[in-house]
């Protein structure tokens, strides 16, 4: 409830800002819509989605697409509705309107525990690993839906991408004793166990030291995309995230204000100043 | 010295019974985050169901124990589905749930009194010859009680560390939201937690009835306090902590009876508990207590 209050008050502040510049942002939308034609075939689609916590909707009439093999970033100020959007996609919140489809099949009302079977992986912002389990057990739980024989194979396959984790697993280090960067690595590895088609990364660099955050965004996330996983990235470090992304959405007050190629958004300093405040200084 | 050895023997038997109950109590809390005070009444109920099977029906006491234990497990799942879950869905607070389980405890306990009456009962079993191990002497039932407890603890250990269900239970205990994200149907894991807890309550209740000789409808609740002490001592929500806590409480309360009256053994249990919590607020093994902000 407390978080929701924050959402509202912050987003109200932002409404005034964005209204002043309504004409500018409108132009951008026109431009970007034309460019959408060049994008790959969509794997995850959100269409006309509205959701909230019983009061007025926090996100309303939202449209976005993640194309096959793309990294798509959602940026936006605090309270823009990013968390609400993610919670709705992963089935924790019920959409009051609209649909979410994965490879053309609706997954809107599918409960969280059944989504992973459909091919949607999710790495939460906080509490993204099981602290009281070992590294290997975390991966086993990540592969909970797999046949027993397959679990071992997938663990080998997954650890091959994260040599550091393999080392930690061999030493049987308790996860709660690991560093932030190591934990995030484990969280990504855990989500990969099910070979998701789409991976939703909710602020993967939150709480990480700057250098570690850079590694996550510039090395680990692109490596996932190279393996064919399409990625929906929600990120505070907007500039870093857009640098590795194909497409970007700027979310303000629960609505998509800008949908454009990541390089286009990056190239327009005014967008950052208008919608993201600290965009070009703090986050780079 | 011989008194000390005898006390140690009793202490080991008690530790075994406490361990069964404390592990059941703590596992269920750890997996479902509901502190179930009704646990004591389930122990009593199982003791009386086994009494009917043993004395009225004429079944062998071990068969009666097995049936009563499984029945307790099933009843616990029904309580979860029928009473606990509806309240949780409504958003009842942690302490609201504690009050509800206290009410459940009283309802079940007095239902037992209403059905079987307020008298002391005993099972229809032959005493058998005492067995001497080194300088310790045990009755036949005490030895079986220790054996069941040891087997039970090894079983719980293997369940938690080796099986898929056990790992899912630990994952759910650690983070239910993340478990769902991994595809675990946490409501089923909760059912499993209630079943296991109810079954262990049943086993502990019947063994308590057996080793005490005679028991009344309050038998479970009389021991619940000590079981909670053992659980907290080891670190709430920790199966291994509960085993450790049970051994400490079981032995020390018996040793203390050499110095002060055995009637004070519960007091001794709590003095130990408070002393440990003063030094280590999360209990011996932290983790769940620290995680859920439940340190003393």
Image (cartoon, rainbow, N blue to C red):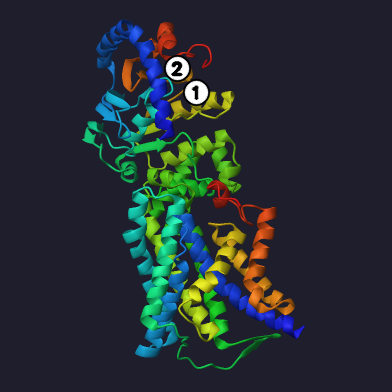
Up/down of A84 relative to A259, above or below:
below
> Label 2 neighbourhood size at 10 Å, few (<14), some (14-19), many (20+)?
some
Instruction: Give the residue drawn at x 71%, y 85%.
Output: B135
B173 relative position to A17: left or right: right
Question: Which mark is drawn over residue A218?
Answer: 1
What residue is shown with label 2?
A: A243
Q: Nearer the viewer, residue A178 or B178?
A: B178
Up/down of B43 relative to B33, above or below:
below
Sequence-wise, which precedes: disc 2 or disc 1?
1
Residue B118: x and y in percent read 44, 82
Q: Chain of mark 2?
A: A
Up/down of A120 relative to B137, above or below:
above
> Label 1 neighbourhood size at 10 Å, few (<14), some (14-19), many (20+)?
some
> CB atoms at circles 2 and 1 under 8 Å apart?
yes
The image quadrant of residue A104 is top left
Instruction: Give the residue drawn at x 38%, y 23%.
Output: A80
Residue B12: x and y in percent read 63, 76
Helix or strand or loop: what does disc 1 sit on? helix
Q: Chain of mark 1?
A: A
Instruction: Give the residue drawn at x 54%, y 83%.
Output: B211
Report the Cα–Cα distance between label 2 and label 1. Answer: 8 Å
Q: Give the farthest residue toward the right.
A: B1
């Amino acid at each position: 409830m407390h978080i929701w209050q924050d959402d509202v008050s912050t987003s109200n502040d932002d409404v005034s800002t964005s209204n002043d510049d309504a004409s500018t942002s409108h132009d951008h939308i026109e431009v970007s819509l034309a460019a959408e034609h060049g994008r790959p075939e969509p794997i995850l689609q959100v269409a006309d989605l509205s959701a909230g916590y019983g009061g007025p909707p926090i996100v309303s009439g939202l449209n976005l697409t993640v194309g096959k093999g793309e990294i798509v970033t959602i940026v936006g100020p605090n309270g823009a509705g990013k968390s609400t959007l993610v919670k709705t996609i992963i089935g924790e919140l019920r959409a009051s309107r609209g649909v979410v489809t994965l490879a053309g099949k609706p997954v809107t009302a599918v409960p969280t525990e059944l989504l992973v079977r459909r091919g949607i992986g999710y790495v939460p912002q906080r509490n993204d690993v099981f602290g009281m389990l070992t590294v290997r057990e975390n991966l086993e739980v990540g592969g909970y839906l797999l046949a027993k024989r397959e679990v071992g194979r997938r663990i080998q396959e997954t650890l091959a991408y994260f040599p550091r984790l393999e080392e930690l697993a061999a030493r049987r280090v308790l996860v709660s004793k690991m560093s932030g960067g190591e934990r995030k690595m484990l969280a990504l590895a855990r989500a990969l166990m099910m070979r998701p088609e789409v991976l939703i990364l909710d602020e993967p660099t939150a709480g990480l030291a700057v250098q570690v955050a850079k590694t996550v965004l510039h090395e680990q996330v692109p490596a996932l995309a190279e393996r064919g996983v399409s990625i929906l990235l929600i990120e505070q470090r907007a500039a870093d995230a857009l640098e590795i992304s194909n497409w970007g959405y700027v979310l303000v007050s629960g609505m998509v204000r800008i949908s454009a190629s990541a390089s286009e958004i990056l190239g327009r300093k005014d967008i950052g100043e208008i919608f993201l405040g600290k965009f070009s200084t703090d986050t780079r | 010295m011989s008194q000390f050895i005898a006390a140690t023997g009793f202490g080991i038997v008690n530790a075994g019974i406490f361990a069964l109950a404390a592990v059941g109590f703590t596992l269920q809390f750890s997996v479902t985050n509901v502190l179930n005070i009704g646990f004591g009444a389930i122990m009593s109920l199982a003791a009386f169901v086994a009494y009917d099977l043993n004395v009225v029906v004429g079944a062998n006491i071990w068969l009666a124990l097995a049936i009563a234990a499984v029945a307790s497990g099933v009843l616990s799942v029904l309580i979860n589905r029928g009473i606990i879950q509806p309240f949780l869905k409504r958003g009842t607070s942690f302490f609201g749930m504690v009050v509800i389980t206290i009410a459940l405890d009283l309802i079940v306990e007095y239902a037992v009194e209403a059905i079987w009456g307020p008298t002391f009962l005993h099972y229809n079993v032959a005493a058998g010859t005492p067995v001497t191990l080194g300088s310790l002497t045990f009755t036949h039932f005490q030895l079986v009680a220790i054996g069941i407890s040891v087997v039970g603890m090894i079983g719980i250990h293997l369940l938690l560390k080796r099986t898929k269900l056990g790992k899912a239970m630990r994952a759910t205990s650690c983070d239910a939201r993340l478990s769902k994200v991994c595809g675990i149907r946490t409501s089923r894991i909760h059912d499993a937690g209630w079943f296991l807890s109810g079954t262990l309550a049943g086993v502990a209740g019947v063994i308590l009835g057996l080793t005490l000789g005679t028991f009344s409808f309050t038998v479970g609740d009389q021991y619940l306090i000590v079981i909670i002490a053992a659980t907290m001592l080891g670190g709430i929500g920790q199966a291994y902590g509960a085993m450790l806590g049970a051994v400490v409480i079981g032995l020390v309360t018996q040793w203390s009876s050499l110095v002060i009256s055995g009637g004070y053994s519960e007091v001794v249990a709590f003095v130990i508990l408070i002393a440990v919590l003063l030094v280590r607020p999360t209990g011996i093994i932290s983790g769940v207590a620290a995680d859920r902000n439940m340190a003393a």
